[in-house]
Amino acid sequence: MQRYKNILITLLTALISVCCICQQVTPYQGSRIFWDMSSQTTIFSSGTYARLIQLQDSRLMAVTDAGGISVKYSNNLGSMWSNMQLLIASNSSVTNTNAEVIQLTDGTILIGYNVRPREPYSEDRKFGIRVLRSTNNGITWSEPIFVYDASHIWNDGCWEPAFLELPSGEVQCYFANEGPYTTNNDQEISMCRSFDNGLTWSEPVTVCYRQGFRDGMPVPLLLQDESEIVVIIEDNGWAGRNNFAATTVRNSIDDNWENGYVDANSPLRELIFETIPPTNFYSAAPYLRKLPWGETVASYQSNENRPNHDLEYADMYVVVSDEKARNFKAKSAPFAVAQNQKCIWNSVSVIDTGIVVAIGSIGPPYGANHIEMIKGYPIWKAIAKYGTITVDGIKTPEEKWTTKDVNQLPMGQVTKNRTFLDFLYDNNYLYFTARVIDRDIINNTSSNDGVRLFIDTDNVSGLTPQKGMYSFFFDTNGTVRFQYGEDGIWKTGTNTSNIQYAINIHSNYYIFEAAVPWSQFGKSTPPTDERMAIAIEIVNRQQYTVITDKIPDVNNNASWTWLEFRLIPSPFVGIKNSYEDFSDIKTFFENNILHIYSPYPVKELNFYSIDGKLVKKIKGIGQNFQIPLSVQECGIINLLLENGQIVNIKI
């Protein structure tokens, strides 16, 4: 009898092991944007439809409708802005609005805008698209250049221009167009071409049209491999939705809209989302941009999570996709907009080495807007450098965390508590720190404020809590609560005596430092050769509820959704100096400047031309850097990392 029991136990154990193994799935792929609340800045005190680009001289340029087409410039990536310059004013008969801006390869700046006649309408004043042109970096501007005119009445107008420059030098201006449909309420996306950098424009061609509906608000993009033109639009014709939904239409660059448009049934028309939102949520006024390494970023406005899902209380959302601009995910709301405010007619921009800038028109429903910007950082991996600190809750200049400002992962959009997080490690401990801005700190109840760290130290990449997954809640009352995963559930652990934890609470913020021994994870040495994953939850206790912030697309119980986490090996300790691969070192050329983003500290860089000549040598350059070259050329980047490893990248 005992023999059969033993066999049964063995079979059950094997079955549980198989179930756990089968739970391992492919880890989450792609960047998620972490918004830095400390970077939020007002660009325009009033305005709407704001757009922003980075000029070739590194200045930021913002355009909006503020009494007409207005511009501002920033010399420090948006921290401060120049006085507003009104380029062309609206008046009692015409509103000039929907400003859009692009700088062409030759340096020419184009501002497109929408001419909207006011009532009473007359046939000599038509809805149209115009362009202002500057060839001296915005010092002077041309007179308005004609692109297109629709009819003279609101129901048959044209709207919302947006530009694209092709590698051939052709410049395209996309816009929503009711002009061809004067007998119904239909609207298409049209496009005019310029072959002389915006001086003259062709007749329009149809890009997409869904009969009986209204394709609108186009923003074009050329994919990283330059194979396709993708245009994001709002489309109100999807079956069962009865509202606008963010959609892409696309065409090969070889065809370039020469052989017909994208109609209602074309496979080249797609909703942008990996997970389709419920039908009672709309996703309108979309915008689309590309990160330097090819991933794509889209924004839209939606009534999701707003009072009674009222359309007038819409908020801005940002999502991320791969190089093909399909299946967008990692949804986040950049602005902590109050429930009695709206954030509409927004846009996104990509500046510097890949910083995402969200630009929002914020104000009360039915009221005037002002223009805000906030910076976000696309992150696909968190890291910890080698080092040691004293766990006392006090940051000193001698303590060298992984990032200079101890701000590797900025969070706090949902709780509205600005939070900075960072990591460090040595042979004995994993260190974790947080600084949380909180004007009402709760630390004397059974459910307090605090920060929860989840970590998968065994690369379980599971669907449910399993062995190798851990949770630590750092309570503002000075205690640590520990849980571990096992057989699909979280179990409470009691062995926290070896965890060092210190918290300092001030009137409007708290800061803590923690050291978790590697033995807590069943490790005798730091797992520098292993992929790990983390999740973070900021817990903000309020009078009647608890609000939490977490990383986009994270399921706290499923470590396959967590953010990848790596320890950066140190040459000064007895650990193997080896990374799994270097695919996350990103390089790209722009305007004869070589941009490099490396998660690993770089000690020295050598750039060799394709024939083996040394073109550039730089020492002590850190992680993110730009290298000006006399020409854009092919070659080999030779990187010497601080841990002694050598990486060669062909560009």
Image (spheres, grey):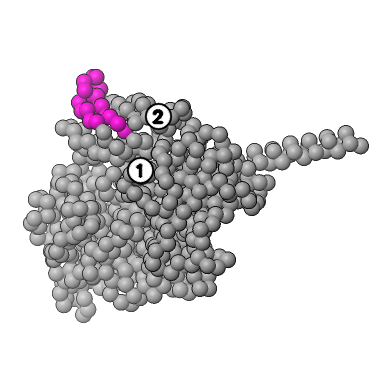
In the image, what residue occupies the spot 56% across and 36% down?
Answer: 523
Position of residue 380 measured from the top left corner of the image (x, y, whole percent): 42, 44
Magenta segment, principal secondary structure? strand
Q: Does residue 590 appear anywhere in the picture? A: yes
In the rendered structure, does residue 610 fall within the stretch colored magenta?
yes
Position of residue 245 measured from the top left corner of the image (x, y, whole percent): 43, 61
In the displayed structure, would residue 239 be above or below residue 589? below
In the image, what residue occupies the spot 21% across and 33% down?
Answer: 632
Helix, strand or loop status at disc 2: loop
Position of residue 470 measured from the top left corner of the image (x, y, whole percent): 57, 47
Helix, strand or loop status at disc 1: loop
- Residues drawn in magenta: 602-619
Amino acid on which disc 2 is placed: Phe
In the image, what residue occupies the spot 21% across and 45% down?
Answer: 170
Front residue of this view, candidates 130 and 309: 309
Left-right relation of 537 to 49 = right
Position of residue 41 measured from the top left corner of the image (x, y, whole percent): 27, 62
Quarter of the rendering containing residue 587 = top left
Circle 1 sits on which residue?
A: 400
Pick the quarter of the image with the N terminus. top right
Circle 2 sits on which residue?
A: 572
Q: Residues within 10 Å of mark 1 (few under 14, many from 20)?
A: some
Q: Which circle's residue, 1 or 2, is located before the other in the chain?
A: 1
